[in-house]
Image: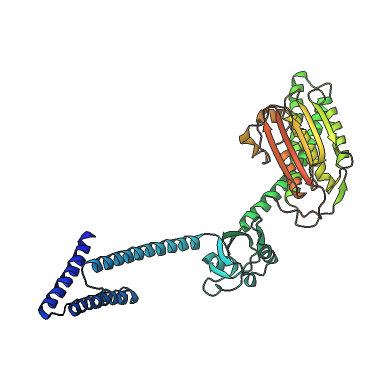
């Protein structure tokens, strides 16, 4: 920088010397100084004009100002900054193109739209799944192209929480699932994927479970009946008595598994239809269930204590609620050691929810197991569960019953305290049951 400015200083000193020499020769000192100053200003404006033209004409190489001193440094710095900007722009364009290629290659359809529902961008899969063309439909309203009522409702409310299921406008046999995701202020993304295969697999699995359960039920009933007769026959040899007893216990366990599988299959395959609701007297169900468990399963091993609001009823399906209540209480008995104290509460949680809380002072459940407890056939202690006749389906049934009643299940556990809390809407509109995976 000092080198550049030294040239300017020398140029300025040369001008002053020139003015003094002209003044000495002509005797017109003031005019000589003024003429030299005007010449320097004219040269300065000429260089400024060259720089302006270069900038205005988009940095054309043939118009690059040729100078030295500070002007040379200014032009060099501007040109260097321009080159950096060009490289940065190229990198950004390459990155944007790469991102576009990646999004275009995704198996999901992606549609970018604004607050007015105007499509800003879309990928190739949007045409494959919904017939939205990235060449002709950009600038159109998305709700004019997708006529599904589910999409229209989601766009009106801008619901970013729930997934939307609708039939593909290009293929009536294809089921699509969409989610609205916020990108930035005034910009939204509609992500759509084809879930037809998943739904078909679910239907196949559910149909298989239901059919297999029905087919197994009859032979198991016959085997169980014969084993019962053999067990009660006094002429059966003593050395076969234990084998017959164990066989009968396992047969009964298999029958219970099948019964639970059928219940679970029924809960999972319910259509999206309005279920007739009735007022369910939960206090009576709790009293009857508590008494039955006290007389049988927990007779000699557990203590059961209940706190029930006598007039607290909810709207629902009585058979499903009975199944959930029985499974929750049965689970607390079967999966805790003898001597465990169990407390069952049925009370209003707040103005919107009523809660069934089952608490025990058992050894607790390790934290890594809690998230998996409602999965089918999941067991924390496999040996103890089978020993007590557990099927591994009870909590899965509970989860689906609660979801079908628009409630939620909360599980907390630590050493000395495990809490299962099923919360149900105290008052709500008719229940709409959805397919559960």
Query: Which residue sits furthest left?
Result: 25
Q: Is any atom of residue 114 visible in this view?
A: yes
Residue 282 lies left or right of residue 206; in this view the side is right
Closer to us: 18 or 316: 18
Residue 363 lies left or right of residue 226; in this view the side is left
Closer to us: 320 or 180: 180
Residue 80 in the image, given as x and y percentages of width and height = 30, 64
Q: Quadrant of the N terminus?
A: bottom left
Closer to us: 118 or 387: 118
Q: Is residue 226 above or below residue 399?
A: above
**Residue name at image x 82 percent, y 29 percent:** 305
**Residue 284, image quadrant:** top right
Residue 44 in the image, given as x and y percentages of width and height = 25, 74
**Residue name at image x 56 percent, y 73 percent:** 139
Q: Is residue 264 above or below residue 114?
A: above
**Residue 302, image quadrant:** top right
**Residue name at image x 10 percent, y 78 percent:** 25
Residue 72 in the image, given as x and y percentages of width and height = 24, 67
Residue 221 in the image, given as x and y percentages of width and height = 79, 37
């Amino acid at each position: 920088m000092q080198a550049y400015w030294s040239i300017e200083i020398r140029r300025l000193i040369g001008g002053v010397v020139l003015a003094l020499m002209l003044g000495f020769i002509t005797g017109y000192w003031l005019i000589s100084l003024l003429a030299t100053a005007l010449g320097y200003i004219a040269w300065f404006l000429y260089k400024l004009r060259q720089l302006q033209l270069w900038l205005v004409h988009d940095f054309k190489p043939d118009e690059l100002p040729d100078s030295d001193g500070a002007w040379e440094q200014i032009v060099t710095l501007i040109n260097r900054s321009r080159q950096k900007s060009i490289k940065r722009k190229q990198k950004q364009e390459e990155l944007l193109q790469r991102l576009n290629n990646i999004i275009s290659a995704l198996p999901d359809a992606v549609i970018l739209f604004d607050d007015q529902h105007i499509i800003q961008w879309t990928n190739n899969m949007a045409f494959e799944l919904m017939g939205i063309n990235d060449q002709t439909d950009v600038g159109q309203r998305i709700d004019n192209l997708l006529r599904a009522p589910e999409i229209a409702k989601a766009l009106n409310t801008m619901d970013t929480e729930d997934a939307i299921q609708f039939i593909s406008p290009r293929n009536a046999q294809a089921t699509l699932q969409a989610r609205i995701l916020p990108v930035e202020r005034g910009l939204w993304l509609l992500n759509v994927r084809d879930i037809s295969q998943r739904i078909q697999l679910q239907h196949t699995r559910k149909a298989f479970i239901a059919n297999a359960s029905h087919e197994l039920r009859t032979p198991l009933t016959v085997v169980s009946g014969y084993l019962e007769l053999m067990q009660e026959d006094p002429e059966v040899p003593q050395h076969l008595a234990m084998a017959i007893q164990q066989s009968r216990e396992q047969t009964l366990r298999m029958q219970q598994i099948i019964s639970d599988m059928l219940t679970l299959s029924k809960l999972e395959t319910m259509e999206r239809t309005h279920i007739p609701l009735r007022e369910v007297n939960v206090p009576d169900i709790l009293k009857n269930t508590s008494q039955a468990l006290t007389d049988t399963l927990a007779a000699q091993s557990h203590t059961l204590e209940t706190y029930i609001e006598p007039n607290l009823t909810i709207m629902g399906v009585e058979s499903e609620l009975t199944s959930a209540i029985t499974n929750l209480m049965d689970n607390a008995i079967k999966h805790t050691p003898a001597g465990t104290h169990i407390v069952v509460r049925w009370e209003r949680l707040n103005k919107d929810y009523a809660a069934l809380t089952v608490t025990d002072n058992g050894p607790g459940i390790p934290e890594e197991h809690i998230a998996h407890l409602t999965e089918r056939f999941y067991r924390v202690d496999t040996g103890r569960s089978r020993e007590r006749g557990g099927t591994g389906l009870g909590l899965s049934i509970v989860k689906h019953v609660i979801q079908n009643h628009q409630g939620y299940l909360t599980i907390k556990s630590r050493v000395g305290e495990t809490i299962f809390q099923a919360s149900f809407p105290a008052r709500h509109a008719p229940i709409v049951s959805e397919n559960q995976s």
